[in-house]
Image (cartoon, helix red, strand yellow):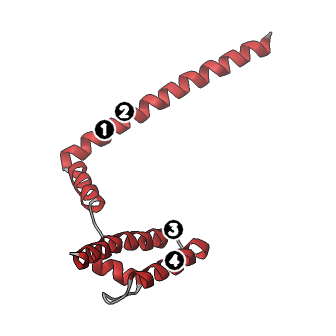
Amino acid sequence: MPSDMAARIIAQLLVMGSGIVVRAVAQAYRQALKNASKTGVAEETLQNAVRKGSKIMTEQEARQILGITDKTSWEEVLQKYDTLFERNAKNGSFYLQSKVHRAKECLENVYRGKDQDAAS
């Protein structure tokens, strides 16, 4: 019987303690938001996030990443892409692998546009 009572007391203490911690964290979060809005930090952070998220890779940057020129054929672009993508998949970084993929996507649009211009 005494162990049941001790278990109940411990359970009640845990429930009360976790409630106190949750309220304290919520209050701290509200205060942090209030402070950020007073100083303009929240707006600046949002603007920076939007600015970074909308950055589009340029053709020049894509060519630099793949190490090609504007005279390079699409087949050579694909060979460079495959080589760099596989190299980074095995022992490189996911960041570099994604940059290589974005470069190929960017150049797909460029080469598609050239093909359409040549067909016209």
Q: Quadrant of residue 102?
A: bottom left
Would you say the residues marked 4 and 1 are in contact, meaning their CB atoms lie under 8 Å apart?
A: no
Residue extending farthest top? 1
Looking at marks 4 and 1 on the same chain, the residue that comes earlier in the sequence is marked by: 1
Q: Which mark is residue 31?
A: 1
Would you say the residues marked 3 and 1 are in contact, meaning their CB atoms lie under 8 Å apart?
A: no
Please tell me which residue is depicted at 53% across the width and 80% down the height of the picture. 83
Residue in front for this viewpoint, 113 or 8: 113
Which residue is tagged 3? 94
| Amino acid type assigned to the residue bearing label 4 in the image | Asp
Task: Classify residue 54 as left or right of residue 91.
Answer: left
**Residue 110 image position (x, y, % from top left):** 29, 74
**Residue 4 image position (x, y, % from top left):** 76, 13
| Distance (Cα) linking label 3 and label 1 | 37 Å
Looking at marks 3 and 1 on the same chain, the residue that comes earlier in the sequence is marked by: 1
Looking at marks 3 and 4 on the same chain, the residue that comes earlier in the sequence is marked by: 4
Please tell me which residue is depicted at 43% across the width and 70% down the height of the picture. 101
| Amino acid type assigned to the residue bearing label 2 in the image | Gln
Which residue is tagged 4? 82
Helix or strand or loop: what does disc 4 sit on? Answer: helix
| Amino acid type assigned to the residue bearing label 1 in the image | Gln
